[in-house]
Image (tube, rainbow, N blue to C red):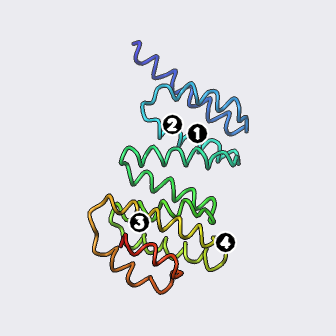
Amino acid sequence: MERQQSQNERSLAWFKLADLIARGEREKALSVFRLLSHSFADKAYILQIEGDILWFMDSSASIEKYKQAAFLYQKEKRLIDAIAMQEHIFTMKPDAIEALAILLILYAFVDWPEKFISRFALLMGLYKDQVADLSQLEKALFALGEALETQAKKPWIAAWFAQEQEQMPKAVVLKLQAFF
């Protein structure tokens, strides 16, 4: 009986939260959510839901919550969840070089060459369109190289690097050759 009552109270709290969100009462909604979040053990998921609430209410703070959730997902080796968060960030902010850099690393880790190549093309597009400068491109690719040092060598990564060297600035290629 007590378990049923507790479940009913949580259901009512979620309903109340949805109502507050629909009415745009941000602070009240976040307060109710923070109370509800104590019933979850998954901290990354809590941050993700908080980001969703903020996103629904058109708050730029949602991106920070999504970044925190993605970081925790990655730390917990839940790479597909981390990818989903970074992709969402990139969808919200198409010039998010940091999200693209992390996506390159994650797609390399999960061995998904098609997505990796697609995201690299987007990164290079941002560089060519002068949205990203040389230092941002270098930082993104250097982070990729460092991350790959911790992984078993994947033949498709070396083939990708050999093929894409022509598109990259020479200074970047020289710094990256040690990694690939």
Q: Amino acid at mark 1?
A: Glu
Disc 1 versus disc 2: distance between alpha carbons?
6 Å
Residue 21 picture quarter:
top right
Q: In the rendering, which numbered label is found on residue 50?
A: 1
Indicate the amino acid at tag 4.
Val
The quadrant of the picture occupied by the N terminus is top left
Query: In terms of sequence position, does the residue under pointer 2 or pointer 4 come before the other?
Result: 2
Going 43% across and 75% down the picture, which residue do you hit? Answer: 117
Q: Cα distance, mark 1 to mark 4?
A: 29 Å
Which label sits on residue 145? 3
Crowd band around label 2 with a 10 angstrom C-alpha radius: few (<14), some (14–19), many (20+): many
Position in image of residue 147 (x %, y %): 39, 59
**N-terminal of the two: label 3 or label 4?**
4
- Tags 3 and 1 touching, CB below 8 Å: no
Quarter that holds the C terminus = bottom left
Can you tell which of label 2 and label 3 is closer to the viewer? 3
Give yes or no for contact between labels 3 and 4 (Cβ–Cβ under 8 Å).
no
- The residue that mark 2 highlights is 46
Residue position marked by numbered label 4 in the rendering? 131
Q: Dot 1, crowdedness within 10 Å: few (<14), some or many (≥20)?
A: many
- Mark 3 vs mark 1: give the one in front: 3
Q: Give the label, 1 or 4, closer to the camera.
A: 4
Q: Amino acid at mark 3?
A: Gly
Write the residue at 39% across / 73% down.
Answer: 114
CA gap between label 2 and label 3 equals 31 Å
For badge 2, the amino acid type reads Ile
Q: Position of residue 137 (x, y in %)?
A: 56, 70
Q: Residues within 10 Å of mark 4 (few under 14, many from 20)?
A: some
